[in-house]
Amino acid sequence: MKRRKFLLSGGLATLAIGASACTNGNMGLAADGKRNKPRLKETKVLVVGGGPAGIGAAIGAAKSGAETLLIENYGFLGGVASWGLGMSMNQMRPNGEPRGYVHELLLEKLQKLGTQAVRLNAHQFLVNVDYLKVAVMDALDEVGCKYLVHARAVDVLMSGNKITGVVVATKSGLAEISADVVIDCTGDADIAFFAGAPTMKETGNLSPQTCLLNVTSTGEFDKNEIDKIRQEAKIKYPLIPDGWSLNKVSTSKHFWINHPGTRDLGNFDITDPLLFSEAECISRRQVLQMVEAMREYGNEQNKVELTGTSPQIGVRESRRAKGAYVLSEEDAVQGKVFDDVIAWRSGFLDIGFVRLTPIKIHQVPYRSIVTEKVDGLLVAGRCISATHEGASAGKSMGNCFATGHAAGVAASICSEENKVPREIDVRKVQAILTKHGVDLTKGGEDQSLKMDN
């Protein structure tokens, strides 16, 4: 197969289209001195953000028959699942049971890539991230979804109070992508914020950020040694957190380390550019201090070697869109159910190394993924309409896949019927999700929970 035919055979065709649009000479200044923003692409459903929620949304929309484009800021898809260096993908199969088409399609594509790609725990996928990046593209290719990487959404296109697309920053400048429906899967409700939709943020009480890291060693790891290292090394290495855990990456000999990150170093609102930068930079120093503390004060862990860090800090919480219903801690703890259910969430109410509370399986209403005031926009993942505690009860990746799946299905119906999200019949969304293997009767059940690694 010739190189050009190979590029055009799958989702990478979008990149070829994009390159053509960006090199037509229209990125320069117009006669009035204003910079042109050429139309890069038109699509029915536009998904912004290629993490777990975005993957679920893109597959859900394309599987339902809508022309769909997924755009991502980084040069690869997968979000924190990919750049988390092997962080477990929690709640992908609660109690070992499939929870829907999008989750299982990704698992199928991972398993086809071989034994190094993934291993399963009670509810988790533990992945080799470089296999995951390809598996995501394979899953999108199967449902006919196009994707474009290296495209950061920096603004929106509006017609009255309806969003009609986004402005992306590319290597050739700013460009426009128009769509019938836009799904905000940025994690930080960026698109909702740009569009003027009401958002919520617990400034002063945000979950901490963490720079994840990979290590390896010629020795054995003793997890009980962490407390000793922390106590002895804290004076010399003041940035090290109170503790951390070492967890096997997929089937390899590497470990990924999760830890409290910035919890004791300050409250950083990453939607503030200055605070985001400060949190990122201090986290880089923190990683080196952790590794050097293990090397200097460890017995078995003194042979540890740093092999990689995530391309940015992991963000557990930031801005959230406000919908007609705001999910709460009480909803999660009580296992609330709704008539307009479009997904369910499981796991823990987990405020990153601050609080861990058992919850029941609880449902997500359609009203929590439809933004107030702005039409043509849906949200999915950790920026759906929820309180600080309610958001922390649903940020596991499997739950983000689920709300993304629902948003994608809803967007496809909107496009087909030429309606905005608040106008469609949610029963049609529920019917398609049921056909996709989602059990929308779940809700209210206690869970047999454990924190697997």
Image: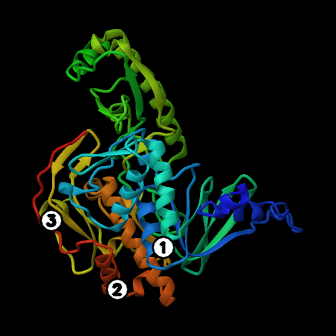
Indicate the quadrant where residue 166 lies: bottom right
Front-most of residues 369 and 129 = 129
Q: Is residue 40 above or below residue 411?
A: above
**In this rendering, position of residue 378 left or right of residue 39:** left
* Residue under numbered circle 1: 62
* Residue under numbered circle 2: 428
* Residue under numbered circle 3: 335
Quote the CA–CA distance across marks 1 and 3.
Answer: 31 Å
SS for dot 2: helix
Between discs 1 and 2, the one toward the N terminus: 1
Amino acid type, callout 1: Ala
SS for dot 1: helix
Front-most of residues 233 and 21 = 21
Quote the CA–CA distance across marks 2 and 3.
Answer: 24 Å
Rendered image: mark on residue 185: none
Between discs 2 and 3, the one toward the N terminus: 3
Amino acid type, callout 2: Lys
Q: Position of residue 258 (x, y in %)?
A: 33, 35
SS for dot 3: loop
Indicate the quadrant where residue 151 lies: bottom right
Q: Position of residue 6 (x, y in %)?
A: 66, 58
1 vs 3, front mark: 1
Quote the CA–CA distance across marks 1 and 2.
Answer: 16 Å
1 vs 2, front mark: 1
Front-most of residues 43 and 234 = 43
Q: Position of residue 405 (x, y in %)?
A: 38, 69
**Do callouts 2 and 3 mark residues in contact (Cβ within 8 Å)?**
no
Q: Position of residue 124 (x, y in %)?
A: 27, 49
